[in-house]
Image: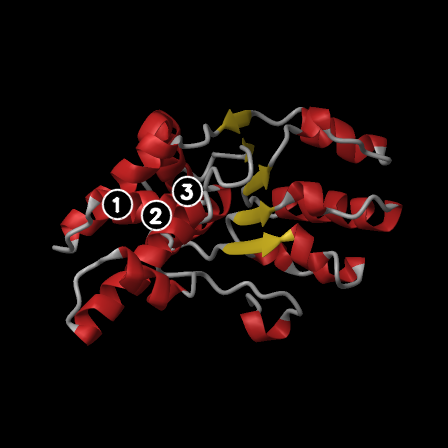
Amino acid sequence: MTQTPSQFPLRILLRDEAGFDNFHAGPNDALVRRLQAWPLAPESGAVVLCGEAGAGKSHLLNAVCLAAEAAGYDPVSISLREAASLAPEALQGFEGFDPVCLDDLEGLPDDTAWQEALLHLFNRVQDAGGRILIASRQPPAALTWGLPDLASRLRALPVWQLCLPDDDQRAAMLGARAANRGLAMPEEVTRYILRRAPRDPGQLLGLLDRLDEASLQHQRRLTVPFVRQVLGW
């Protein structure tokens, strides 16, 4: 029987607001379409999703999990950086999930016990017929591994590379989302938000959701002073 999130020390609940429908793919359109198809193919295997901070890796891992869940699978998303605050045993018990999405590969402690725990998790998931999607800022081949078996396993995986959206693409993302919500987004407001907002597309669109709710609640249009007030900038 699959265990419930309350039985694990890690926070593994999915975020409903981070799906494929609100990820602005931009130059990553082909890659995003591959990711959309990935959870629907049981023979998918294991893949590394690579990209700089802010490219949207966490958003896409969550989107993959939501798509897998909608297709009848039982996915889970785990942050290895978050797990590092616990004991290596925190990675036990996830082989009953499919797919298993592992975020923040570079956050795994440089420690033999942790690397063995990740290798054992990898083996258990694959032995159970599950699939693994790993997100990392750098390809596994560029990272240092103290455990040769883990190094060879990770370095053999296909790497799908995400491009970081530039400011024009981020502006287009905001504009499209605002238009879908019937929200007027003046150019000066867009520039103000982009200068201060995180580069992660999911976080950026989350800010717009907050602004939309505040605009409706206070019956205010978006202006720089109003945005500053709502977001505390």
Q: Amino acid at mark 2?
A: Tyr
- Residue at 58% across, 66% down: 11
Image quarter where the C terminus lies is bottom left
Of labels 3 and 2, earlier in sequence is 3
Side of 117 relative to 31 (left or right): right
- Residue 105 versus residue 148 in the image, above or below: below
The front one of 132 and 60 is 60
Of tags 3 and 2, the one toward the viewer is 2
> CA gap, disc 3 to disc 2?
37 Å
> CA gap, disc 3 to disc 1?
40 Å
- Residue 174 versus residue 79 in the image, above or below: above
Residue 43 location in percent, x, y? 47, 34
| SS at circle 1 | helix
Q: Which residue lies most toward the left here?
A: 182
- Residue at 70% across, 46% down: 107
Image quarter where the N terminus lies is bottom right
Please say if the residues under marks 2 and 1 sit with CB atoms less than 8 Å apart: yes
- Residue at 26% across, 37% down: 172
The front one of 78 and 122 is 78
Asked if one can make out residue 20 in the rendered structure from this viewpoint, the answer is: no
Q: Amino acid at mark 3?
A: Pro
- Residue at 48% across, 34% down: 44
The residue carrying mark 1 is 188
Instruction: Quadrant for residue 5, please give it.
Output: bottom right
> CA gap, disc 2 to disc 1?
6 Å
Q: Amino acid at mark 1?
A: Glu
The residue carrying mark 2 is 192
Q: Residues within 10 Å of mark 1 (few under 14, many from 20)?
A: few
The front one of 50 and 115 is 50
The residue carrying mark 3 is 39
Of labels 3 and 1, earlier in sequence is 3
Please say if the residues under marks 3 and 1 sit with CB atoms less than 8 Å apart: no
